[in-house]
Structure formats: structure tokens, C-alpha cells
Amino acid sequence: MTVKMSARHVSAYYGDLRALDDVSIDIDTQHVTALIGPSGCGKSTLLRLLNRMNDAVPGARVEGSIELDGQDIHARDMDVVELRARVGMVFQKPNPFPKSIYDNVAYGPRIHGLARGRGELDAVVETSLRRAGLWDEVKDRLDDRGTALSGGQQQRLCIARALAVDPEVILMDEPCSALDPIATARIEELIGALRGRYAIAIVTHNMQQAARVSQRTAFFYAGRLVEYGDTSDIFTNPRATSTKDYITGRYG
Ligand SMILES: Nc1ncnc2c1ncn2[C@@H]1O[C@H](COP(=O)(O)OP(=O)(O)OP(=O)(O)O)[C@@H](O)[C@H]1O
């Protein structure tokens, strides 16, 4: 197993509030990692630390180390724009730009200079939309606005946008919570198809979803990583009482 990202003794604060407490976790490319736990336990905070999205939050502070391919993401020579291309993020609510479908996907490759000329850009857009499972639905209307698509299609467009800059890691923060069951199933299928090519970490409140899409599960409680292991073990044989109570729905 090749570790893609590794967090060591990470604590995170918002002012005086400690949102994460001494968390160490590895994320790899072979498995999808689900981050689960009750509201406020720090799952989203961990996700946002992994591509330094929390840098912009006033009063937010982090301790410990986070590495991408063994490289410290807080190092002075780390280019944050490049980091966010390598470690892409998909949010709860689909957030396409108010631009055409084509331009949504072409945006990243354009600003990162990843395509020479229109032919190459077209190819990147097509490949990304194909990988996101959206190409067949939009190939004849690439000039339509991204915001005109259905919610599920918009979320796949956002995934295509993340894929277009050739990321190594994809972070998903409850990517299906605004979607209906059919759109959710498509995203779950897509996560399965992307596994192995990208390291994927997904925050979800839906236990069935965690069980379906992930091979590794991390259970958080009050800022601490309580248990991390194979999804099947966590769900069938949790070691901690708090994990067991959570996955059996005693609290949420
Ligand atoms: N921008 C912020 N400013 C201040 N406190 C914050 C901020 N973001 C999160 N917190 C606090 O940090 C703690 C962890 O929040 P976080 O969003 O990481 O938890 P979570 O497990 O993802 O919760 P949820 O499942 O509800 O999204 C919570 O107490 C939350 O109120």
C-alpha cells in the first residue's frame, strides 16, 4: 500500500476551540477512505486541512504535520494553488461556475497551463467528463451553462472540473447530501470507478454509503480519531463502544 497523504499528530483550532486533537491518519490510492462520526467531530476540518482550505479561516491554526508524497504541505516552498490542484475538493452543494459546461472543466487546465492549444484542451475536457461519467449526457451541449444541469449532473461536473487538473487526491465533503437517491447512486458508482487512480477521502453521514463506497473507515468523536481500519471490520466488529453506538444509530 502506497501512502499518498499522511497526517501526523494533527491538532486544529478555531480560536480557543480545539476541533481536532492529535489525529494521525494515512490516505492511500488503493482504497477509498470514509470519514465518519457525529456532527462537529472534526471530519470536515480534517478534509479542509489536507489541501489547506482552512488557511483562509480567520483564527484557524494547525499543529502537527501533513505530507503529500512525503512532502510537507506547510513547507515554505509549497505552492498552495498547485497543492489544491493536486488535492482536489468536491463540496456538499454542487458549485459549478456560472460559465458553460466546457469552460467549467477547461478552467483549471487553462490557469495551470496544462493544455497547448484548443485541440489539447478539447481532449482534456472530454477525458475529464468521461471519467466523471457525464460525457454522454452533455457532449452535444457543451456550451450550455453548467448551472442549467440537474443537481446530480452538476456534482459530476464539479468532479470533472477537479479531474481536469490531473489531481492525485480527491476530497469529498458529503458529496451526495443534496442529491436524490438516483443521482447519489451515480456518484457512488463513479467513486468506485475512480478508485485506484486517485486517493479518495469522503466525509459522509450516511453509514450505508460509507459501507458501500469505502474500503477504509475512520471514526471520529469529539475531535479524536477513535478507530481507523478496514470498513468491513469497523462495521461488523468495532472495537470502541462509541464507534459501535454510532454505527448502530444510537446517536448521530
Ligand atoms: N470556520 C469555523 N470557525 C469556528 N469554528 C468552526 C469553524 N468550522 C468548524 N468549526 C467548529 O469546529 C468543530 C468541528 O467542525 P467540523 O465542521 O470539522 O465537524 P464535522 O464533523 O465535519 O461536522 P458536520 O458533520 O456537522 O459537518 C465544530 O465544533 C465546529 O463548530
Image: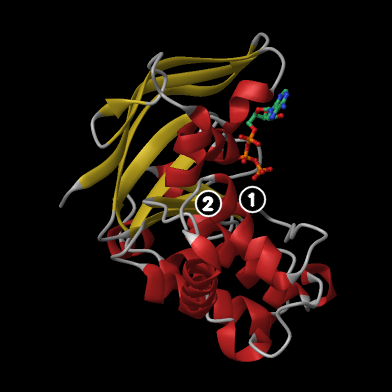
Left of 251 or right of it: where is 194?
A: left
Can you tell me whether the CB of the residue at mark 2 lies under 8 Å from the nearest atom of ligand 1? no
* Pointers 1 and 2 in contact (C-beta within 8 Å): yes
Is residue 181 shown above or below 128?
below
Q: Nearer the viewer, residue 189 or 146?
A: 146
- Under circle 1, the secondary element is loop
Q: Residues within 10 Å of mark 2 (few under 14, many from 20)?
A: some
Q: Residue at image x 78%, y 78%?
A: 150
Percent of width and height locating residue 186: 57, 81
Identify the amino acid type marked 2.
Tyr
Q: Residue at image x 50%, y 29%?
A: 80
Q: Nearer the viewer, residue 115 or 57?
A: 115
User: Which residue is farthest left?
Assistant: 1
Percent of width and height locating residue 34: 44, 55
For label 1, the residue is 252
User: Which residue is farthest front?
Assistant: 117
Quadrant location of residue 158? bottom right
Is residue 102 shown above or below 173?
below
In the rendered structure, which disc, 1 or 2, sits on the residue that comes first in sequence?
2
